[in-house]
Image (cartoon, grey):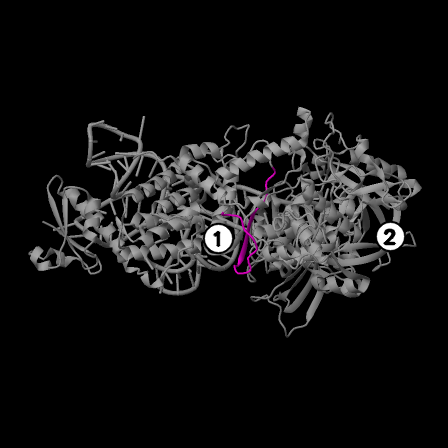
Amino acid sequence: MERINFAKIEKKWQDRWEKEKIFEVKEDPKKKKYYVLEMYPYPSGEGLHIGHAFNYTIGDIYARFKRMQGFNVLYPMGYDSFGLPAENAAIKNKSHPKKFTEDAIKNYIKQQRNLGLSYDWSRKVECHRPDFYRWDQWIFLQMFKKGLAYKKSAPVNWCRKCNTVLANEQVKDGKCYLHEDTEVEVKHLEQWFLRTTKYADELYEGLDKMKDWPEDIKAMQRNWIGKSHGYEIGFEINGSKKWPIFTTRPDTLFGVTFMVVSAQHPRLHELVTKEQKKGVDAFLKKIKSTSQKDIDELEKEGAFTGSYAVNPATGEKVPIWVGNFVVADYGCGMVMAVPAHDQRDFEFAKKYGIPIKQVVAPLFKTTEGKDAVRKDILDDVRSSIFAIVKHWSEDKYLCLDWKNFNWKSLIIGEVDTGEKFEEAAVREVREETGYSDIKSIREIGFENHGHYYAEHKKVNRYAKFRTFLIELKSGKREDTREEDTKNHEALWVDGNKVSHFLNLPNNKYVWEIYKTGERAFIDEGILINSGKFDGMNNRKAIDEIGKKFGKKVVNFKLRDWLISRQRFWGTPIPMVYCDKCGAVPVPEKDLPVVLPDDVKFTSERNPLIGDEKFVETKCPKCGGVGRRETDTMDTFVNSSWYFLRYCDPHNEKEIFDKKKVKSWMPVDLYIGGREHATGHLIYSRFYTKFLRDIGLLGFDEPAVRLFNQGMVQGPGGEKMSKSKGNVVLPETVSEKYGIDSARIFLVSLGGLDKVRDWSDKGAEGSLRLVERIMNYFDNVKIGKSSAKTQHKVNKAIRDVTLDIETMRYNMAVIKLRELFEGLESEIARKDLESFVKLLAVFAPHVGEELWEKLGNKNFVSLASWPSWDEKKINEEFDKIDAAVEKTVGDILNILKIVKGEKVYVYVLPNELKNYSASEISRRVGKGVFVFAVNDKAKYDPQGKAGKVKPGRPGIFVE
RNA sequence: GCGGGUGUGCCGGAGCGGUCAAACGGGACAGGCUUAGGACCUGUUAGCUUAGUGCUUACCUAGGUUCGAAUCCUAGCACCCGCACCA
């Protein structure tokens, strides 16, 4: 087959599309709008790789599809052109980041054009241009007016490599999001923040309504915003002021034995007494010197401040510690510590010898079987013990087998009046087993309660158990009384078999605690040591105790967005500092504050700082000497609203025309990477809500539907990277297979949201398809479609339409393939055109070429999407195909037996239609003569065909 | 620890109650076409078996629901991803 010159075809159509501006759109009240958007890229010097191509192809296919369906499709592209790499490149080459950036953009545009993407290029936005970033500054001023932009001193994340601070969202795993090898340091600086927390609740609750966003992204945002319900409880400190603390577990209030304040708490010094200052300072110094990495596995540490708080529930005085595990800006920066019921507090208390007070006890209530609590019998409340008795020389434990009750237990016993628990444990072991030579005894875990029917005593027993480990010194035994031992047999059980041996849940539980080590009890249980709340279920007690001692509050993990960056290549923050007036906003009429073009990039330092022309200005308020803010904004500020600017990209009077935005927004389909889940995708939601509240927008969320594409990896399943040398470039791919084949290949590799590996073999497969299609068009006869063809075409239109709609492009391509396989050598023009239309969204250049070949003068890109006729779809045809399939198999089987001879095959068309004979003939190859026959008797004198089962085609051989 | 997700043939990957030994592609193998072919066409690709069939074992594992399960439920295992000292 002659090689097709894809490069020529691609160029031809890309030029025509551009020349005739067919993808440029205007608002049109007569058409329904559809806004398809891919996250605009940072124009890096490296250009696009095949992963980008995949990303854009997803959107392009959808945009083309919607356009052909008659929607007025807005499908723009732009560049996130502020950012560090450009600045670093400028420093390296002693040039200006603008030059670097604009070169990179040119390259991007060229590459994207070559992918055949149907962007409306007239709407391109580039955020490094003053006509864009002046509106960043304008929004900042609106936020400033509303108190949503503010400056404060705070501990901030500093990246040494970026030489600037970072937002919380830009710190991943303690590392900088741009430099995975660089640990973020903490610095205390005056910085500008945007008050994202004002919208925390709406950002959180709004997620429930976003049905067309992926679950995982919404989960990540929920987790990031971190809404939690709890109570604020005031603790009196040092006899005077009340400090509030936040807790989700007020049910454990009676168990508070100390308080912990954050080491970063701004009011820490008020708590530290003279006597303790030295200790606290030493502690603070120590934790400052620990690197972020160590903090990850850090043990809980702290120091006593010397102050005390009063527990409002018990009136007890408890010490206040400073600790490294309390976050300063979450909740109140101080926590009530309940070591018995919080694992962190538990570890801290163990380490510093602080008392542990249990206030919740696990309850094991038997509700089934013969031991189930009986309703008609009163409870008998008793104090009881479990004893874990360890063998004097081996790893064995003494257990009881209660044959008549089907219990397998540890040593269980009741505490007599006036007796201590330990004494009872020792006594019970002696009475029930005879062992009496004890080396040591210690308590294990917490009190736990059992509620069951005790058959041997005929009572409902409510037992409060404490557990003791008793180690024997020797096997010395005393005599036992028969009445104590008649119900059970004492056995020594191997340490690793005890867990299987025991069959009572509470026994299993205390054994588990003994084996795995003691820890805080955090599960559901019954309150104890809690005054009048004793006996209450702790879940219920959360509200009961919370209400009594505090007030209900909601807390968020989300922090305000730190937007100051100590770098040049970003939007200047429009503020002026004046000795008299303080921080003064630049008046709107003076916007934009423009980045100078003539600065020298000589060092790592932000060159704005030394640029007197930029810095020196007048105070807008008093006219006196003013100095401009030299920090710039985080680049995520630009991406928080760029999608609005596409609606009205050249407006010089205002940020955008409200009417235009109203007619295009919100984005109907937003495509981009998962990595933006908790950054860009939260920021842009925040901006949308703010702009709505100042009256510019009439909707709540920027994007109706979000789609996260999967990553494209290198051939071996490895991430593409320059260092590995496995980067696949779209240019190379285009040259080898044509970009249309590559587009088809990329989207056929399985779900679009799944990871995929590039493979040359796979791309060849798609190329074969494209070549076969083009070849078919060279030979096809245009005439009439058979009913079968009509069936196939209509069914394919229906299926492909649905598959594209639901973004199952891989399935759509398969349906297209199947359709193509089934096309016959003669076909109606309309059906052939439908096929081209379906193909054209995936393979736009080839689509146009074939469209033209069919004699069309317009563009298939603007043709209307084919509709299908349900009446033409007849599943019978698929059954016939299956029958043909089967018959071919059968014939080939027969051929194996009658090898080498001429074979005549007669096909009885009980299931097959007449035309199937030629299809069968084609597939079984030469040397076999296939005939369709109607008169069975005539061709089948022996009646062989009669043996054929109904529902299958009959064949027989002459 | 919390949260999201995934487990199917040699590989990628459809299927999500019967029409499933399981689409489609890739690979491998066989045959045809041809001077030749890495190009194209046709077929095979769990095992056994038959002249068009039938059977067995199969969709991570173990149970369950059902006349019937790759598909639904329960438990477990494995892997991937995100967040994580958030009180």
Residue situated in front as seen by the camera: A953 or A789: A789
Q: Main secondary structure of the magenta part?
A: loop
Res A529 → quadrant: bottom right
Q: Where residue A193 sits: x, y (%)?
A: 76, 46
**What is the distance, in whole Å, between disc 1 and disc 2 at their CAs?**
68 Å
Residue A313 visible? The answer is yes
Q: Secondary structure at mark 2?
A: strand
Q: Please check the rendered image and state whether residue A652 is part of the magenta-colored stretch, yes or no.
A: no
Please give the range of residues in magenta.
Answer: A22-42
Q: Please check the rendered image and state whether residue A26 is part of the magenta-colored stretch, yes or no.
A: yes
Q: Chain of mark 2?
A: A
Residue tagged 1: A67
Q: Where residue A568 sits: x, y (%)?
A: 73, 34
Q: Residue furthest bottom?
A: A376
Q: Chain of mark 1?
A: A
Which residue is depicted at the point 71% across and 61% down? A538
